[in-house]
Image: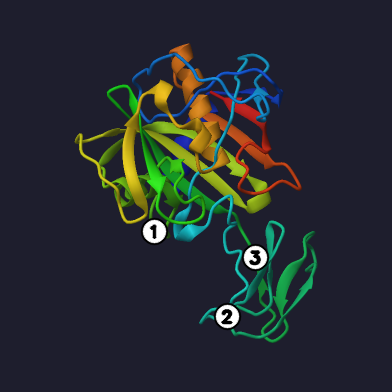
Amino acid sequence: MLKAIQILGGCCSSGFVSHRWKPHTGSGFPFVSISAKPLSSSLRRLPSNSTLLVMSSARLSSRFGAFRSRAGHSESNPVGASSSSSSSSVAVQASGSVLKINFCQWCGGPTKHEIPEGEEKIRAICTVCGKITYQNPKMVVGCLIEHDNKVLLCKRKIQPSYGLWTLPAGYMEIGESAAEGAIRETWEEATAEVEIVSPFAQLDIPRIGQTYIIFLAKLKKPHFAPGPESSECQLFALDDVPFNSLAFSSMLVTLNLYVEDVKAGKFKFHYGTINKRPGTSPSDINAFTLDDHLQS
């Protein structure tokens, strides 16, 4: 984690140009690949009714998608959104983007939900031991792998978004850096050995409490095959990327940003906030805006 933060910090220190994206009905289809090699610059057109955003200075048209997270959690299944109790005596219920924790994870005692002294948000406070449970965003890490001017995608073999395409990505584990997690996830989903080239994007999704870090990467060996959570793995040329069959909004965003960088002939580091539209289905990968887009 520290390693990844230091890397990303280095990118940010060079200075960002800030833009706010606005609805745009134009077309254009970029996509992300993890390599420094340029891909074909030809782009796909998007359905006219899809939600598009454009960066005022770069005219970046986009349709975005969010990628998979480990243990079946994703944009379509917010982290920990379960109502079942566990052996650690913690029971949770989904409540928007925040979970209602009914029992203490330390002693199992019932909790009350109040604003602790000196704080501003309601927390779960144990009525027995007095400990406070804090909920923090989950980090999802993955790789955008380019090989022979193509991008490696995996077709999901698990829910959510079964049968849809994504970059290899998932939850970062305790004890590993973001880069190490991205390499591990790529091996688990595509049995591919990769080398990180550079960080490419950080995308926050506050509504579901997730942050995505995607790295550009390259194959160490030209070998890959579906892992246990994938039914297929395939290299796609830019014109053939299945943009209408992507699993998540974060993937759609990442791939579009990548295509724009390919067209510009230079890869940048991107930061942005994906705000899902209230009242829309979590599985609608086009129902969002990309706000506060920064690039360096």
Q: Position of residue 93 (x, y in %)?
A: 67, 70
Q: Are marks 3 and 2 in contact (CB under 8 Å)?
A: no
Q: How is the image coloured?
A: rainbow
Q: CA distance from mark 3 to mark 2?
A: 13 Å
Q: Sequence order check: which comes first, mark 2 or mark 1? A: 2
Residue 270 vertical placement versus 203 (above, below): above
**Local crowd size for mark 3, using a 10 Å CA cut-off: few (<14), some (14–19), many (≥20):** few
Which residue is located at x 39 percent, y 58 percent? 175
Q: Nearer the viewer, residue 71 or 197?
A: 71
In the rendered image of this protein, does residue 10 appear above or below residue 26? below
- Look at 52% across and 57% down and name the residue there: 73
Asked whether residue 62 is in view, the answer is: yes
Crowding around mark 1 (Cα neighbors within 10 Å: few <14, some 14 to 19, many 20+) is few
Q: Marks 1 and 3, how far apart in space?
A: 20 Å
Q: CA distance from mark 2 to mark 1?
A: 22 Å
The amino acid type, in three-letter code, at marker 3 is Tyr
Residue lying at 66% horizontally and 47% vertically, measured from the top left? 206
Q: Secondary structure at mark 2?
A: loop
Res 134 label: 3
**Image point (59%, 85%), residue name:** 107
Q: Say which residue label 2 marks.
A: 106
Q: Residues within 10 Å of mark 2 (few under 14, many from 20)?
A: some
Camera-side residue: 116 or 171? 171
Residue 247 horizontal/vertical position (percent): 51, 43
User: Which residue matches tag 1?
Assistant: 175
